[in-house]
Amino acid sequence: MTLAVDLLNPSVEHEKRSHKLKRLVQSPNSYFMDVKCPGCLNISTVFSHAQTVVLCSSCGTVLCQPTGGKARLTEGKLLFPQKDQLRNETQTHLFFPVSATMLNFL
């Protein structure tokens, strides 16, 4: 008897819909993003699930407002998510090739 769904190789859509703890590899739903202020062009780093109003550090305009889940960006702001960049950096630092000379020092 075969299964209708491949459990070892789930689709990307299935991984996005599943709960963050029930994914094949656990990963959070939140991320940090760079938001550019349209008035002063200052770039600020904002958490995606911010629970307070985030203001621009130089001019004081509202960059995002909290909702029940993710923070809502105000209109006219440019958004640069950092999720993939941070994930790739952590993967390169965690998995590195080990040579025989490195094993001698350990």
Image: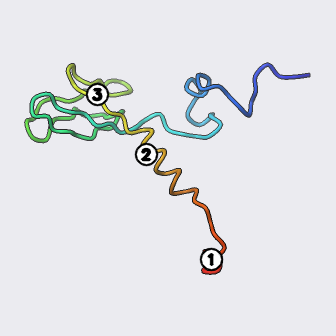
Say few, some or many: other residues with alpha carbon within 10 Å of mark 1 (under 14 / 14 to 19 / 20 or more): few
Q: In the image, what residue occupies the spot 33% across and 36% down?
A: 33
Closer to the observer: label 2 or label 3? 2
Q: Residue flagged by tag 1: what amino acid is it?
A: Thr
Q: Secondary structure at mark 1?
A: helix
Circles 1 and 3, Cβ within 8 Å, touching? The answer is no
* Residue position marked by numbered label 2 in the rendering: 86
Q: In the image, what residue occupies the spot 32% across and 28% down?
A: 71
* Residue position marked by numbered label 3 in the rendering: 66
Say few, some or many: other residues with alpha carbon within 10 Å of mark 3 (under 14 / 14 to 19 / 20 or more): some
The quarter of the image holding the C terminus is: bottom right
Q: Residue flagged by tag 3: what amino acid is it?
A: Pro
Q: Residue flagged by tag 2: what amino acid is it?
A: Leu
Label 2, label 3: how far apart the Cα atoms are: 23 Å
Circles 2 and 3, Cβ within 8 Å, touching? The answer is no
Q: Secondary structure at mark 2?
A: helix
Q: With respect to residue 95, does 85 lie above or below?
A: above
Closer to the observer: label 1 or label 2? 1
Q: Position of residue 22 (x, y in %)?
A: 63, 34
Q: In the image, what residue occupies the spot 87% across and 22% down?
A: 2
Mark 2 or 3, nearer chain start: 3
**In the image, 32: left or right of 95?**
left
| Number of numbered discs visible in the structure rendering | 3
* Residue position marked by numbered label 1 in the rendering: 101
